[in-house]
Image: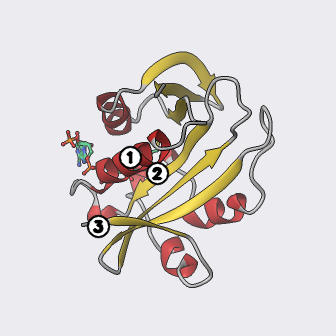
Amino acid sequence: MPEIRPVTKDNWEELIRLKVREDQTHFVASNLYSVAESQFGDDDEGHWDFLPHGIYEANTPVGFLMYGFNFEHPTQQAFIIRLMVDEKYQGRGYGRFSMEKLLEIFRADDRIRAVGISYEPENESARRLYASLGFLETGRMIEGELEAVLQMR
Ligand SMILES: CC(C)(COP(=O)(O)OP(=O)(O)OC[C@H]1O[C@@H](n2cnc3c(N)ncnc32)[C@H](O)[C@@H]1OP(=O)(O)O)[C@@H](O)C(=O)NCCC(=O)NCCS
C-alpha cells in the first residue's frame, strides 16, 4: 500500500531526485523548486501554508505532492499545488491513490468546504484524472492554467 509522508530533513534529498518525462517538464515545477517554495508559503488572496509530501511505495520514493491551506479563503480552503509521479513509476495508480488520499484528509476537516487545483490546458491525463474525482472547471485561469474546484460541503 503506498503512502504519503511529509518532507523532512531526512528525505528531501531523495525526493528532489524524482523526475517527470522530458516532454512533461513544463507541466510541473521541479521538486527542488517546490521544497524551496514551501518554506515561504504564498500570500495570494490571504496567507497559504504549503505542505510538501513524498509519495512512497514501502520505502521507495515514487512521487511528490504539495498542498496548501488557507482556512480564511472565501471559495477554496485547500489547494493541491503540485503532483508528480516519477517517470519510472507512472501509470501504476500512484497519482490516483495520492489524490484520493488528499481528498480523504480534506474531507475529514470541517473547515474545508472546497478544494482547488490547476493544470495546463494541454495536460489531458491530469485533466481526466481530476475530472474523474469530481473537480469542475471554473472558467478562471491561474497563471496560464485552468482552475478546477471540488466542492466538499
Ligand atoms: C499526472 C500524473 C501525476 C498521474 O500519475 P500516475 O501515477 O501516472 O497516474 P495513475 O497511474 O494514477 O493514473 C491516473 C489516470 O491517469 C491516466 N493515465 C495514467 N498514465 C497514463 C498514460 N501513460 N497514458 C494515458 N493515460 C494515463 C489514466 O487515465 C488513469 O486513469 P484510471 O485510474 O481511470 O486508469 C503523472 O502522469 C505525472 O506526474 N505527470 C507529469 C506531471 C504532471 O502533469 N503533474 C500534474 C500537474 S497539474
Which labelled disc corresponds to residue 72? none
Q: Which callout, 2 or 3, points at the residue further toward the start of the chain?
A: 2
Q: Which callout, 2 or 1, points at the residue further toward the start of the chain?
A: 2
Does dot 3 land on a helix, a strand or a loop?
helix
C-alpha gap between disc 2 and disc 1: 9 Å
Q: Nearer the viewer, residue 125 or 113?
A: 113
Q: Nearer the viewer, mark 2 or mark 3?
A: 2
Rate crowding at label 2 as few (under 14), some (14 to 19) or many (20 or more) other CA atoms within 10 Å: many
Q: Nearer the viewer, residue 17 or 113?
A: 113
Instruction: Examine the rendered structure and indicate whether residue 138 appears above or below residue 131.
Output: above
Tag 3 residue: 88
Instruction: Examine the rendered structure and indicate whether residue 116 appears above or below residue 69.
Output: above
Give the residue type that dot 3 points to. Answer: Lys
Please identify the quarter of the rendering in which residue 58 is found. Answer: bottom left
Assess mark 1: CB under 8 A from ligand 1?
yes
Indicate the position of residue 17 as horizontal and vertical percent values.
48, 75
Assess mark 2: CB under 8 A from ligand 1?
yes
Tag 1 residue: 99
